[in-house]
Image (cartoon, rainbow, N blue to C red):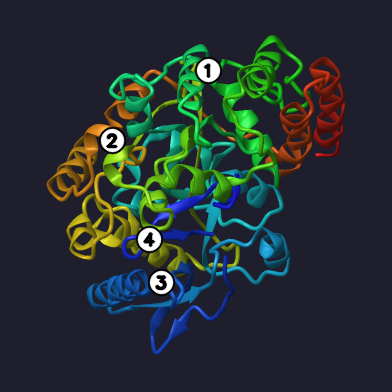
C-alpha cells in the first residue's frame, strides 16, 4: 500500500520512524560549470537526526564529486499520492525522484521516466541488487529506476502474551489454523486482551485481504491483469477465517473498522497478541506505543505460500540530461547503495544515535555485497535479533509478490468486503466476493 498510515513506513536512522513518500522540482542542470541535480525525499526539519545525516551525506558526496551540485527537496511525506500524478503531468518532478514499487509501470506508461539502460552500467551497485527488485523497475527490457528499500509482510506477535497463554513464543503459528487457535488462547486471558486484530478501513482492509490471499496461494487479479480472481476457494478461506475468529471465537474483539494506528496502540499496550505488518512496525511499537523490544517478535506470513512485498526506489525525469542521469546514479550509489554505509546503511552511526539496528528488513543486496551489509549490521545490532529469526528463515520459502495493479482502487473495493465480514455476523461471503469481483473487473477494464 501507500506508506504508513497505510503501508510504507521506512525506519529512520535517528528518532523513531520516518514515513517516506514526494516533493517539488528545480530545473537547470548546470551551475558554475557543475552538473546540478534536484533530488527529493530529504527528511523534514522535524526529523532532526535524519535531516543531519542526509545533509552530512550530501556534503560528503559533493566533496568527493566537486563537479556535481545536489539540490535536495524535503517534504512530508516523500511522495504524496494527492499530488504525485499532477507533478508528473506538469513536468514538475525532481531530476531524481522517489517512487513506490507500484508506481514504476505507471510512470513509464505516461512517458515521464528517463530510460536509464544506457547508463546503468555506471551504477557500481546495480548488479549486486536482488534481481526480483531490479525487475520491478524494468519495463519491456529497459531499466527505468533503481530500487532502494524493500519490505515484506509477516506476523508480528507479543511474546509475553504468548507465554501467559501457554504458547511457545519461539514457535509462532505457521498456518491460519494455528493463528486461530493461538488467538483464542490469548483472548481467553481476558481483561480486554485481543488475540488477533486486522484492519478494515481506509483501504487498509483491502491491503491486508490481499496479503492474506497471497499467503494462501491466491491472487487478486489474473496474470494478464484483466480479471478479478478473488471469488475463489482461497478468497473464501480468507473471509471465512476472519468471520469465524470474529464471531465464533470472539478472539478479534468487538471493536472493528480498525486502522494501523489502532492496532499498534493495542500491541504497544500489551493488549494484542498478533497482527500482520512489516518489520518497520517494530520500532514504532517501541518508541511511540510503549512496547519493549524484548516482547515484540515477527514470524513469516502464515499459510506458507507467499508474502506481499513492497518498497521504494528512485526514477529520473524524462527531462534529465545524460550528465544529470550519470550524476544522479553516482548520488544513489553514495547515499543508499553502498553496503554498510550511507544514509540507510551506516549502522554504526545509527547505533550511536540510538536508532534500531538489526531489524529483519528484506535484503537488498546479493553475494559479497549482502555479506558485507549483514556483517556491519550484526556488529552494530542493538535489538533482540533472535526474535526475528523465524521471519528471516521462513521468508526464504515464500514467493515474494508485489501489490496488484490499481492497488488503491482495488483496496477500496475490498475494504467494504472485509469490513462487512467483521461487522455483520450474517455477512453473505458468496455475495460479497461476487459483487466485489464485478467492481474490480470494471476498474481493470478502464485501465
Q: Splitting the image into 4 quarters, where does residue 55 fall?
A: bottom left
Q: In terms of depth relative to the viewer, which is nearer, 216 or 422?
A: 422
* Residue at 28% across, 35% down: 366
For label 1, the residue is: 180
- Circles 3, 2 touching at the beta carbon (< 8 Å): no
Which numbered disc flags the more N-terminal residue, 2 or 1?
1
Q: Distance between the residues labelled 4 and 2?
A: 28 Å
Distance (Cα) linking label 4 and label 3 = 9 Å
Nearer the camera: disc 3 or disc 2: 3
Q: Is residue 254 left or right of residue 355?
A: right
Name the front one of labels 4 and 3: 4
- Between marks 1 and 4, how big is the CA–CA gap? 32 Å
Compare marks 4 and 2 and give the one earlier in the sequence.
4
Q: Earlier in the sequence, mark 1 or mark 3?
A: 3
Looking at this view, is 29 or 288 the one in front?
288
Comparing 49 with 247, the one in front is 247
Counting from the top left corner in percent of width and height, residue 216 is at 56, 16
Give the structural element (helix, strand or loop) at label 4: loop
Query: In the drawing, what numbered circle is on residue 16?
Result: 4
Residue lying at 51% horizontally and 68% vertically, measured from the top left? 321
The N terminus - image quarter: top right
Work out which residue is located at the far front of the displayed protein and give it. Answer: 191
Category of crowding for the residue at label 3, using alpha-carbon neighbours closer than 10 angstroms: few (below 14), some (14–19), many (at least 20): some
Q: Name the residue under label 3.
A: 47
Give the crowd class for mark 4: few <14, some 14-19, many >=20 residues within 10 Å. Answer: many
Specify whether 400 is left or right of 446. left
Secondary structure type for disc 3? loop
- Closest to the camera, between mark 2 and mark 1, is 1
Percent coordinates x, y for residue 291 in the rendering: 36, 48
Dot 1 or dot 4: first in sequence order is 4
Amino acid at each position: 500500500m501507500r506508506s504508513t498510515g497505510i503501508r510504507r513506513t521506512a525506519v529512520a536512522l535517528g528518532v523513531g520512524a520516518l514515513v517516506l513518500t514526494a516533493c517539488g522540482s528545480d530545473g537547470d542542470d548546470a551551475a558554475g560549470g557543475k552538473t546540478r541535480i534536484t533530488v527529493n525525499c530529504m527528511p523534514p526539519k522535524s526529523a532532526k537526526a535524519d535531516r543531519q545525516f542526509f545533509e552530512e551525506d550530501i556534503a560528503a558526496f559533493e566533496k568527493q564529486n566537486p563537479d556535481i551540485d545536489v539540490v535536495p527537496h524535503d517534504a512530508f511525506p516523500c511522495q504524496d499520492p494527492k499530488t504525485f500524478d499532477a507533478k508528473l503531468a506538469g513536468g514538475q518532478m525532481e531530476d531524481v525522484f522517489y517512487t513506490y514499487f507500484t508506481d514504476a509501470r505507471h510512470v513509464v506508461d505516461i512517458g515521464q521516466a528517463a530510460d536509464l539502460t544506457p547508463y546503468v552500467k555506471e551504477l557500481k551497485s546495480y548488479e549486486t541488487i536482488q534481481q526480483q527488485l531490479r525487475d520491478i523497475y524494468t519495463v519491456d527490457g529497459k531499466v527505468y529506476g533503481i530500487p532502494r528499500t524493500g519490505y515484506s509482510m509477516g506476523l508480528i506477535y507479543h511474546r509475553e502474551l504468548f507465554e501467559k497463554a501457554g504458547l511457545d513464543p519461539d514457535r509462532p503459528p505457521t498456518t491460519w489454523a494455528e493463528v486461530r487457535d493461538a488467538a483464542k488462547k490469548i483472548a481467553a486471558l481476558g481483561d480486554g486482551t485481543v488475540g488477533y486484530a486486522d484492519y478494515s478501513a481506509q483501504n487498509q482492509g483491502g491491503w491486508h485481504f490481499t496479503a492474506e490471499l497471497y499467503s494462501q496461494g491466491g491472487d487478486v487479479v489474473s496474470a494478464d491483469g484483466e480479471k478479478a480472481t478473488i471469488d475463489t476457494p482461497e478468497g473464501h478461506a480468507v473471509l471465512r477465517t476472519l468471520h469465524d475468529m470474529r464471531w465464533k471465537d470472539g478472539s478479534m474483539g468487538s471493536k472493528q473498522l480498525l486502522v494501523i494506528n489502532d492496532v499498534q496502540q493495542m500491541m504497544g499496550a500489551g493488549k494484542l497478541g498478533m497482527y500482520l505488518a512489516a518489520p518497520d512496525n517494530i520500532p514504532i511499537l517501541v518508541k511511540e506505543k510503549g512496547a519493549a523490544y524484548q516482547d515484540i517478535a515477527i514470524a513469516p506470513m502464515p499459510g506458507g505460500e507467499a508474502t506481499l512485498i513492497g518498497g521504494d526506489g528512485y526514477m529520473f525525469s524524462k527531462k534529465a540530461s545524460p550528465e544529470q542521469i550519470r550524476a544522479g546514479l553516482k548520488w544513489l550509489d553514495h547515499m543508499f547503495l553502498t553496503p554498510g554505509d550511507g544514509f540507510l546503511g551506516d549502522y554504526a552511526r545509527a547505533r550511536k544515535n540510538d536508532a534500531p539496528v538489526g531489524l529483519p528488513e528484506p535484503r537488498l543486496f546479493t553475494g559479497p555485497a549482502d555479506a558485507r551489509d549483514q556483517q556491519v549490521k550484526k556488529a552494530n545490532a542493538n535489538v533482540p535479533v533472535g526474535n526475528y529469526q523465524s521471519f528471516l528463515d521462513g521468508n526464504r520459502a515464500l514467493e515474494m509478490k508485489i501489490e496488484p495493479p490499481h492497488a488503491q482502487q482495488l483496496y477500496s473495493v475490498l475494504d467494504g468486503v472485509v469490513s462487512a465480514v467483521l461487522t455483520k455476523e450474517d455477512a453473505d461471503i458468496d455475495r460479497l466476493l461476487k459483487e466485489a469481483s464485478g467492481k474490480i473487473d470494471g476498474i481493470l477494464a478502464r485501465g
